[in-house]
Image: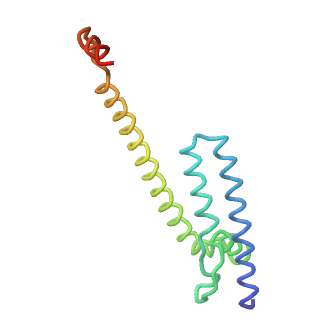
Amino acid sequence: METLDYIIAWLIYLVAAVAMSYLLWKTLKKIFWVDLAYVLQVTFMAIVFTPWYVEADSSVLAPAIIIFVMDIVTIELVAGIRSLVPLAMAILLSTIITMFGIATYRVRKVRRLLNIKKTRRERKPSKLIVSDCAEYYSCL
């Protein structure tokens, strides 16, 4: 495959994957709980966007999921394992980062809500004293 054909194929694949990712996000956000939608979306993106070498001694890259399927179909079941390693690592790492981000967001949200409640309790007006009202109205 020539270099220009290779670049065009990757560009078409990336545009299609971004469009599919966008549509999947819109669907997941409506159907599932938002945190679960984040995890599913990140898993999908890790599967779709992880590249790997077409051949072991080659410098040509292709999506790892496509290499996995093609190796299973054309060579043998064991040959597909070489592309599953980076795919599994990408899924694991992206899921860990997403779960950490979700947990951090939840903790910050709870702290913010507790801080708002605390400041509301501190700002409650004290009972109005009649002498204060008399002084206020006499100055007007």
Q: Which residue is more in the foreground, 134 or 78?
A: 134
Q: Residue 79's image quarter?
A: bottom right
Quarter of the image where the N terminus is located? bottom right
Please give the count of numbered marks on the rendered protein. 0
Q: Position of residue 74 (x, y in %)?
A: 73, 77
Q: Is residue 90 above or below residue 40?
A: below
Q: Position of residue 132 (x, y in %)?
A: 25, 14
Q: Residue 18's image quarter?
A: bottom right
**Left or right of 133, for residue 8:** right
**Looking at this rendering, what residue extends furthest in the top direction?**
130
**Left or right of 113, for residue 14:** right
Q: Position of residue 85 (x, y in %)?
A: 53, 70
Q: Is residue 98 above or below residue 35?
A: below
Quarter of the image where the C terminus is located? top left
Give the residue drawn at x 26%, y 8%.
Answer: 130
Q: Position of residue 126 (x, y in %)?
A: 27, 17
Q: Which residue is more in the foreground, 81 or 25?
A: 25
Q: Residue 127's image quarter?
A: top left
Give the residue drawn at x 68%, y 75%.
Answer: 71
Q: What colour-coding does the image apply?
A: rainbow
Give the residue drawn at x 65%, y 46%.
Answer: 28
**Looking at this rendering, what residue extends furthest in the left direction?**
131
**Looking at this rendering, what residue extends furthest in the bottom direction?**
2
**Left or right of 104, for residue 63:** right
